[in-house]
Amino acid sequence: MFKHIYKGKKVFLTGHTGFKGSWLAYWLLELGAEVAGYSLAPNTQPNHWDLLNLPIQTVVGDIREGEKLQKAMQNFQPDVVFHLAAQPLVRESYLLPVETFETNVIGTAKVYEAVRSCKRPPVLVSITTDKVYQNNEWVWGYRENDRLGGHDPYSTSKACVELLHESYRKSFFDKENIRTATARAGNVIGGGDWSKDRLLPDVVKATANQQAVQIRNPQATRPWQHVLEPLSAYLLLGQHLLEGNPKATESWNFASDFEGCVPVQTILDLMQTHWAKVQWTDVSANEKLHEANLLQLDSTKAKTVLQWKPIWNIAQTVAVTTNWYRAYYEYGEVNTPKDLKNYVAEAEKQKLCWVA
Ligand SMILES: NC(=O)c1ccc[n+]([C@@H]2O[C@H](COP(=O)([O-])OP(=O)(O)OC[C@H]3O[C@@H](n4cnc5c(N)ncnc54)[C@H](O)[C@@H]3O)[C@@H](O)[C@H]2O)c1
């Protein structure tokens, strides 16, 4: 996979204790990489990071602690850095706006300074989000050259990261031969996420407690995708940066196809077909915080230039995710290895470029 480029490579992850970071650490180890992680300790119980118990070098630290972070990166001397650490929750960002901006914007600047401080420049993939665009509530997918913006502090902080990244690229990275890109992916689901105020974690926690989950916005439509889809994109982008493809050093959308852009209500219906105990009540009448209703991304650029594409449709995505949680709650199983194996097998069947 990925032309064996990760075999023996030193890969530094920020946010390795999180949902995406723990899946990425697992996949990188499967690819033969030497992995190091820098993050806060997991803040949910259970959490995917502890369940996987992976053999990687870790430092528990805050990305805002610039010196500690630089030391960790300099000691490891990475070939590749994937920056995922963030305060990633919209509702939390209304409660903790200053901390959200500090972590996501200033913390990212400190990650970039740590990258610059390495003797041998690594390549860098910086993870932002589908929410970086000014949301016009229109039916078209946002493209990379659409206007950045944001309403809630989380989305705005990630739009700020895109501007910060562009400033660092022009001012430092290009001159210092540090090849970088940003990746904007959609609403990610998959086993092992227990974050607060996210749809799937809320549903499975309520279901495990034999309760109906309260749904704040059943009509909200998002580009849902399985966690392995954006991870395959981040790894492919990292591969292009390592190979020195000059076209890769840009911003990239990685989203499900438009058919995968469905309302919350559809996700709940699909989940129920795999776990009959899933029940919900509509509490949208009480909802006061603003969240975008309609959001779609256009991944034409990634499909054309990188030959990346998503491989699981929405029904498969929800099935795999629901079955992961069901197996965990009913049998104590962690199906991460099985899900990755099936995902790679499907990629092979569909002849995706990165399985070559
Ligand atoms: N999950 C999604 O649907 C989604 C969608 C789009 C973008 N993203 C982005 O992907 C990245 C990973 O998201 P996730 O879903 O895995 O989130 P998560 O909350 O599961 O993980 C966040 C990680 O960041 C770490 N972290 C948070 N604050 C930190 C700090 N100050 N210093 C050091 N580490 C810190 C946490 O310890 C954790 O390891 C984030 O940048 C997020 O904005 C996520």
Image (cartoon, rainbow, N blue to C red):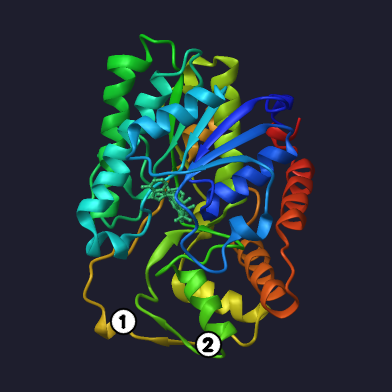
Front-most of residues 57 and 51: 57
The disc placed on residue 112 is: none
Direction from residue 93 to residue 6 in the image, left or right: right
What is the quadrant of residue 24 in the picture? top right
Examine the rendering and report whether any part of residue 58 can be seen: yes
Classed neighbour count for the residue bearing mark 2: other residues with Cα under 10 Å, few (<14), some (14–19), many (≥20): some
Left or right: where 11 falls relative to 212: right
Query: Which of 266/285 is in front?
Result: 285
Q: Position of residue 58 (x, y in %)?
A: 56, 41
- Residue 254, percent from left and from top: 49, 42
Q: Choose between 287 and 40: the one closer to the eye.
A: 40
Q: Could you say which disc has been placed on residue 279 in the image? A: 2
Q: Quadrant of residue 293?
A: bottom left
Q: Which amino acid type is marked by label 2? A: Gln
Which quadrant holds the C terminus?
A: top right
Label 1's element? helix
Q: Do the CB atoms of the residues marked 1 and 2 lie less than 8 Å apart?
A: no
Residue 315: % across, % down: 63, 66
Question: In x, y percent, where is residue 80?
Answer: 55, 26
Question: Considering the image in quadrants, where does the N terminus appear?
Answer: top right
Q: Residue at x 24, y 59 (%)?
A: 96
Q: Tell me which residue sits at (37%, 13%) in the image.
A: 174
Residue 292 at least partly seen? no
Q: Secondary structure at mark 2?
A: loop
- Under 8 Å from ligand 1: the CB of mark 1? no
- Characterize the local packing of mark 1: few (<14), some (14-19) or many (20 or more) Cα atoms within 10 angstroms: few
Q: Is residue 136 above or below residue 8?
A: below
Which circle's residue, 1 or 2, is located before the other in the chain? Answer: 2
The residue at which mark 1 appears reads as 284
